[in-house]
Image: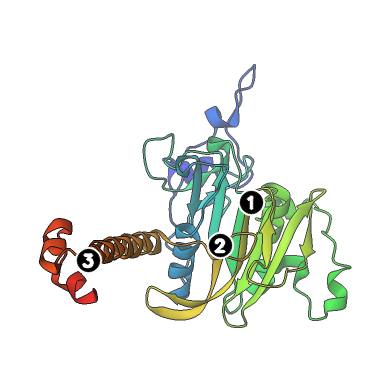
Amino acid sequence: MSGLELRFQPGNTLPQVDPPRSPRETLPTMYDLPSEYPEEPGLPDEFHDLQPQLLSRTLYLSNYSRENWFSASDLNLYYDVNHALWHKRPDWFLVVGVPRLYEGKTLRRSYVTWQEGASPYVVVEFVSPGTEPDDLGRFYQPKTSLLAKAKPKALDAADEQSPPGKLEMYERYLRVPHYIVYSRHSQKLRYFRLQGGVYEECSLRSGNCAIWLADLEIGLGVWQGEFENIPGHWLRWCNQDGTWLLTDTEQERQAKEQSQSQLLQAAQNLLATGMSLAQVTELLALSDEQVQQL
């Protein structure tokens, strides 16, 4: 066992001084903590690789510049200053108000909350066979009537010595405002909002914009279409009116199509003035393909 593992076993903390220093100074950084654990399984399927990409590539936050938020998938998330090695690997999460790069300089190996100074604002988990009880915690009930009665249990001494489940960790330790669970097999989407320190399940809206995050001014819904040439039902960000937000690739293609349309319109306008096709082609530097479209 390494010195780090000996020092940061669950329940161990670094010694403090008088006056006490902050956790940022006394606890390990992302360079000290493991970025992966060999005993943990890899991604369960290709969806868990592609879906996070679509979420990140269609995300647009009007109140934050791209350099002022961070999103990641399957990255170690360290969350408890009293148990430095406790971590989860969310399928996708978003943190706002932090630099895109770690300390503005480098890619992150993991996300260490006591070093970053901010917890995730949105977490999305994708249901896999066998993960639903952990993804949903106390909300995993066979009967809908029991959901409204579901309450968080009180912590006891035994609970404090073992890592919490996903929902409990997001709710009690990180206080993530928006927690979303999605099953691609059933296209079932569930949304939990932190209210008074406790998650409450919220009803979904009709239409594309099933979930509206008013504080981020962005919506989320299930989009049926092709991403990376693979058809499916994907989670995708949208405007409040349900208009799907474009990926970077789609934005580039749209801009190219608009430019092409404007160029052809300019060519048609010049032809209407009596200019010859050869003159218009030379003036606008039209390609053979563009000439054929006139």
Q: Is residue 116 rendered to the left or right of residue 253?
A: right
Query: What is the CA distance from the residue labelled 3 to the residue labelled 2?
Result: 43 Å
Give the residue pinned by disc 1. 217
The first of marks 3 and 1 along the sequence is: 1
Q: Is residue 25 rendered to the left or right of residue 250?
A: right
Mark 3 touches mark 2? (CB < 8 Å): no
The first of marks 2 and 1 along the sequence is: 1
Query: What is the CA distance from the residue labelled 3 to the residue labelled 1?
Result: 46 Å
Q: Amino acid at mark 1?
A: Glu
Residue drawn at the location 57% of the way across and 78% of the way down: 184
| Structural crowding at the residue carrying mark 1, measured as other residues with C-alpha within 10 Å and reported as few (<14), some (14–19) or many (≥20) | some
Q: Amino acid at mark 3?
A: Leu
State the image quarter where residue 207 is shown.
Answer: bottom right
Under tag 3, what secondary structure? helix
State the image quarter where residue 286 is shown.
Answer: bottom left
Seen from the viewer's position, the closer of residues 163 and 284 is: 284
Camera-side mark, 3 or 1: 3
Give the residue pinned by disc 2. 237
Camera-side mark, 3 or 2: 3
